[in-house]
Amino acid sequence: MRQFRGLKIFLINFFLFFVLVSSAQNRLKLNFNEDWQFRNQENLLPSIDIPTNINFSFEGWQTICLPHTAKIEPLVIKNPWIGISWYKKDFVINPEWTNRKIFIEFEAVMQQAEVWLNGKLLMKHTGGYLPFTIDISKEVSFTKTNRLVVKANNQDNPEVPPGKPIDNLDFCYYSGIYRNVSLVVTGPLYISDPVKENRTASGGLKIWYPLVSKKEAEISVATHIRNEYPGDKTFIIACKLNDKNGKTVATAISDKQTITAGGQISVTTRLNIPDPQLWHPQHPNLYTLKVEVVENGKTVDAVQSHIGIRKFEVKDEKFLINGEPLLLVGTNRHQEYPYIGNALSDNAQYRDAMKIKQAGFNIVRLSHYPQSPAFMDACDKLGLLAIDAIPGWQFVGDDHFMQHSYQDARELIRRDRNHACVAMWELSLNESAMPDQFMENMNRIAKEESPETKLLTCGWINKYYDVFIPARQHAKPPYYWKNYDGKIQLFTAEYGDWEYFAQDAGLNQAGYAGLKADERTSRQLRGNGEKRLLQQATNYQEAHNDNLRNPHLGDANWLMFDYNRGYSPDIESSGIMDIFRLPKFSYYLYRSQSIQPTLKIASYWNEKSDYHNLKVFANCDEVALYLNEKLIERKKAGRNSISDKLPNPPFIFDLKAFTPGTLKAVGYTNNKKVAEDKITTAGSAKLLKISFDLSGKPFKANGADVIFAYVTVCDKKGNQVYESDREVQLETSTGASIIGPDHVKAEAGIATFLLRSGSRPENIIISAKSQGLLSGKSTIMSTK
């Protein structure tokens, strides 16, 4: 029997090798982001002619690349732009594609889209966060230039989730074609698109894991195929699984299948993997699965997917991954950037995921809507669990709204079901009075869309769902959720902001009552000074420590990055990084609770510093603190009522008095030096230094990538002048442009600018100047 199995594997491998060598892949997926023309409705000349007319003149329209926001917003948004915007793209079709299938895929358009091709309306799509695909095979011309026109309307619509009017929504959903667009070409016998197909538990590739263990794993792959030939077609499905090194570890081929003309079929294949490399946040092992449709020995279509073999469960008040308990330590994320809103490049999405991972979190709640496929890919790669959410926030609409929300749930599952990172599905309208029938229907949808493997659902009401995800403030101080005894497992989905902003908490903080309202809150801009940033960190420490007393799965703070609420004259600033992705002290508090090596002196070390309670965030055994090379103290971290449950409490030193100079902290583990940090009292401002945020991804020359340029105000020795709010001007050579203002004031000694890449690789020269200071200059290379 074993010999027969070995012979079978050999024959399968030989067959797959023959297929891969002897045939070319028949599917093309082409980037369709470049060379669009754009104009907002309000900027069109008054005319009865509209851009959908075939003879409309687009003279004077702006040429742009996607992703794109229809309106560059100010840094602080009081009234976000709403209206109608128009996009146009001219393109030609390769004559060789005659008799092939041609699709246009939109990852998202905010939030009602109408699409015309060559003057014909092809689709109206509602919903701003999920993809849609249009079959243009019968509409394109092979002999002349084609014209694609898209009308994007982000005006309020109570029938389209989230449904709440933008003027008090509490976050912004922005505008435009703000994610990628692709042109997909296949043969008439092809693997379908899971969202376009709109079939329950079907469409495209559907992957699940009937068996997951360290010794063996089984992968089931359901492949949905369409036949749009005029006659029947016979084929097989061939699957190949490669590990991270490109080595083939499993293969499978199906029996022969036949589809009638115009028909469709789903074919399931299974792969067995001995000694699998399981996916886990601490070791995010990914495999590459290639699925081919093979007709008469020739590959006629193929789809490739990165997958992680893992199993999620909730049992005995614990979250289990691959049978092992994992305490979930997380944060929330809004996907916005300054000025461009949600129109982040794929690389920018990755950089955000990288920052969340580096902060020490193992899970991120995607509040309160589906986020970019590129962000999901980054979570898979980096080992960051995700709570995937439908659009919903403090609003329940009529039956049209609810039906749309049900469809959102199905499309979200179909889009993201193969991602390793999705731990829970938030099929819930956050902080909304959902009817029981609505919640029952959402959980029924989850079962229908995944009959083979249970999806863990979660919601903010403790009924029906597998996990109860309230905010901390949904219970009352001083107990919050410590006395929770519900049957549904608890995960605290938000904490650290509202209870300190509105409930005036501060359960165990010494001296808390003596603080002014704006000093107590966790909403602190990076420029609000050392005292208030330390208070934000203390608030998060106290709340997280208190959460750890609960019998719960974990928690997620509110939140990772500052963001705009749209109706308020200020930025919502409870992020542990600011809107420019610069860290506050709270960032290092969280990082020190993880396995990420951390040692950070939480001080600017100037006359305003609290020298009696100088904090060092670290995850080593001991810290030695020096002032001007003189040892102050070497100690272990102490514990008190707001740190007794933390893995790594802060180290607190009393220096008795302030003396200017250099503080140095040295960290020791097992009596061995493992880390060092320094902070020096800054002198007067003398010069500027420029740095860039790449976070694991190069500056891509595609006309749409965006990075932050940080200009630091320094003294003559290069120390950051934290008190500086000088105005700084930035200039850039060709190869990049500045989005937003080119003159900004420094905040806590750093002025930040947003750069957009050009369309070709260049060595870009960046210059910064400020009156009375030595100018700064730096270069960065954009790459293809």
Image (cartoon, helix red, strand yellow):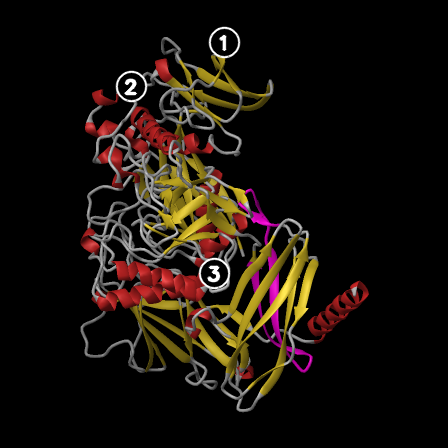
Mark 2: secondary structure? loop
Q: Main secondary structure of the magenta part?
A: strand
- Residue 100 x %, y %: 52, 82
Q: Which residue is mark 3?
A: 417
| Magenta stretch, residue numbers | 278-306
- Dot 2, how many residues are within 10 Å of its Cα: few (below 14), some (14-19), or many (20+)? few
Q: Is residue 522 visible?
A: yes
Which residue is located at x 21 percent, y 71 percent? 45
> In which quarter of the view is residue 474 placed?
top left
Up/down of 13 relative to 342, above or below: below
Is the residue under label 2 in contact with that under label 1 (CB below 8 Å)? no
The reply to whether discs 2 and 3 touch (Cβ–Cβ < 8 Å) is no
Residue 63 drawn at (x, y percent): 37, 65
Q: Mark 2 sits on what residue?
A: 510
| The magenta stretch spans residue 290 | yes
Amino acid type at image mark 2? Ala
